Amino acid sequence: FETGSLAGCRVLVTAGPTREAIDPVRFVSNRSSGRMGYAVAAAAREAGARVTLVSGPVALDGPAGIERVMVETAEEMRVAVQAHLTGCDIFIGAAAVADYRPAQAAAQKLKKHNATLSLDLVRNPDILAEVARAHPRPFTVGFAAETEDLDANARTKRMQKSLDMIAANRVGPGQGFDVGDNALTLYWEGGSESLPHQSKTRLARELIARIAQRFHDAPPS
Ligand code: C5P
């Protein structure tokens, strides 16, 4: 990890979960703590970048020296990302964006009239894939959190979303989400590398060093 390896670069990072309203008091979300994304944003700052962090609801303080934009829903995250994309050199999508949201948020609190309740869910926009389709586009990095077939799922996801790099990690009980350490395998066009299990802070520095290297060697086309 070289201090200054991203000097003069603008980096945009998403982190944390999103919340999708069911009614005024309830939401659909996931177990993301935001820790990996926050560590990535801090590591990019340490490497000399100007960093904007678009964050879903988390219990973390904003890292020093970083512009933080708080959002709640996937749609709000998408709007915030689009608003900060101009001039961005590197985009790192570490947020656990909810894949689906309730088709309609109820205006009033739902009442428990029936023994069962069905929620109609609709797909959320894929923020990362949209960034990767932009012209010009930043060097685009995604995450793949998987419970199985890590290698195959990550490679497929990188191709389908046209990413310059994907960082894959296992998730499950005590792994990946809501814990302080993690391991990552990185995939790019023509290569891969496993970064060993360590604190998310150290892991993020290693990830940023690899991103900086690939960004300078193979800028986005
Ligand atoms: O397809 P999957 O959700 O597993 O892809 C994960 C990657 O895509 C992460 O980098 C995540 O931040 C990003 N993503 C996104 N918008 C979505 C879903 C995922 O930016 N709606």
Image (cartoon, rainbow, N blue to C red):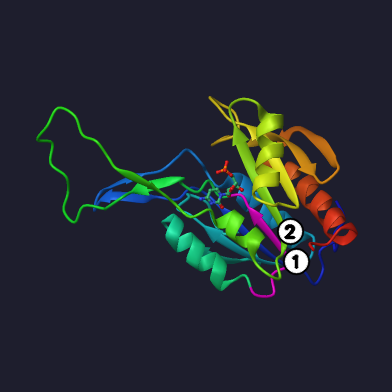
Q: Is residue 73 above or below residue 113?
A: below
Name the residue furthest right.
Answer: 217
Q: Which residue is mark 2?
A: 44
The spot of residue 176 in percent (x, y) is 60, 33
Q: Label 1's element?
A: loop
Q: Is residue 169 above or below residue 106?
A: above
The spot of residue 219 in percent (x, y) is 83, 62
Please name the residue shown 72% across and 38% down the image: 155
Q: Is residue 56 above or below residue 113?
A: below
Q: Amino acid at mark 2?
A: Ala
Q: Label 2's element?
A: helix
Residue range of the region highlighted in magenta in the rendering: 86-94
Please name the residue shown 44% across and 62% down the image: 76
Q: Is residue 84 magenta?
A: no
Please name the residue shown 82% across and 38% down the image: 192
- Mark 1, residues whose alpha carbon is within 10 Å: few (<14), some, or many (≥20)? many
- Compare residues 160 and 167 and report the one nearer the observer: 160
Q: Which residue is mark 1?
A: 49
Q: Amino acid at mark 1?
A: Ala
Q: Is residue 90 magenta?
A: yes
